[in-house]
Amino acid sequence: MPKRKSAPEGEPAAEPTRRRSVRLQNPANAAAAATETQTEAKLKPSTKKSATKTGTTEVSPPAKRGRSTKAPATAKESAPGGKTATSGIKTPQEDDDAASSAPNGTAGADGERNYWLLKAEPESRFENGVDVKFSIDDLAARAEPEPWDGIRAYAARNNLRAMKKGELAFFYHSNCKEPGIAGTMEIVQEHSPDLSAHDPKAPYYDPKSKPSDPRWSVVHVKFRSKFAVPIGLKELREMGGPGKPLENMQMLKQSRLSVSKVNATEWEYLVGVAEQKALQK
């Protein structure tokens, strides 16, 4: 089957050692300390020192008695809930694992539907001896869901993996005389391994991708509609100027990305443009 062209593309600090003057704030401790001091004063009058500050007498402790009997807290002290104080800190390996798992994609917490734009080449071009031509008409002629294969860029692959069954996408004609959005399609099967990456005769064979550890993915799509008049790249760029409706559209910001996100506002706007162009035909 025709292949798709890839994009030309704290640890909490230990509790400070408590000062003895703080420990004396407890009335029971203060009384015990006062008795201790009076006894010491009888034995060693020369060690008694007193100072009056705001009406309170503070007793200086005898030498070598200022250290608290309570062991200071350490970084290994258990935190509430049974976790250690270091359990919330990620190691570099954990960061890598999180980054690699993120692209698999999950539905948004609010259940909002995502939209997409996928590029294919409607004119003949040979890659590894295989013609990679595939147009909106080719998709319309398919009796079965079509695997959108040949994606060999990680950003595009990650977008594929984020797609959910039932979501819609624009079909974009790329690398041709008149590039632009030609119609729409539906995601009918979520991502699975791209087996063409393991075929030496395939146009986008990747010897580094192994069947036991596949790098690349496909989704399956089916035809939904063909625009009476395509929305050309020149028009899209004009609508993507500062302050315009498509100002932040990913496809215009990252022009070499073969699979890009489209937000709901952009989708509705472009569908409206296509309908208006059909009326003016």
Image (cartoon, rainbow, N blue to C red):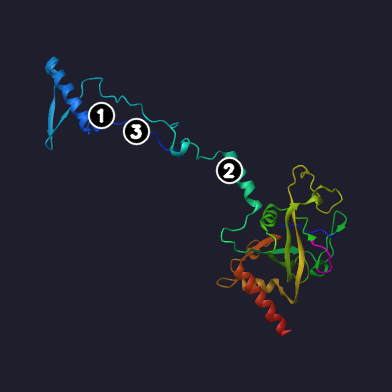
Q: Which residue is mark 1?
A: 20
Counting from the top left corner in percent of width and height, residue 13 is at 40, 36
Q: Which residue is mark 2?
A: 95
Q: Is residue 164 above or below residue 209?
A: below
> If you read the primary sequence from the N terminus, does the residue marked by circle 1 or circle 2 appear first?
1
Q: Which residues are magenta?
A: 140-145
Write down the quadrant of residue 274 in the picture: bottom right
| Kind of residue at disc 1 | Arg
- SS under mark 2: helix
| Kind of residue at disc 3 | Pro
Question: For the residue carrying disc 3, how many other residues have a C-alpha within 10 Å: few (<14), some (14-19), or many (20+)?
Answer: few
| Kind of residue at disc 2 | Asp
* Residue found 25% across the figure and 31% down from its top: 23
Q: Is residue 143 magenta?
A: yes
Write down the quadrant of residue 56 in the picture: top left
The answer to whether residue 180 is seen in the rendering is no
Left or right: residue 202 compared with residue 63? right
Q: Is residue 73 above or below residue 213?
A: above
Q: Looking at this rendering, what residue extends furthest in the bottom direction?
A: 280
Numbered tag placed on residue 16 in the rendering: 3
- SS under mark 3: loop
Secondary structure character of the magenta stretch overall: loop
How many angstroms separate mark 1 from mark 3 (CA)? 12 Å
> If you read the primary sequence from the N terminus, does the residue marked by circle 3 or circle 2 appear first?
3
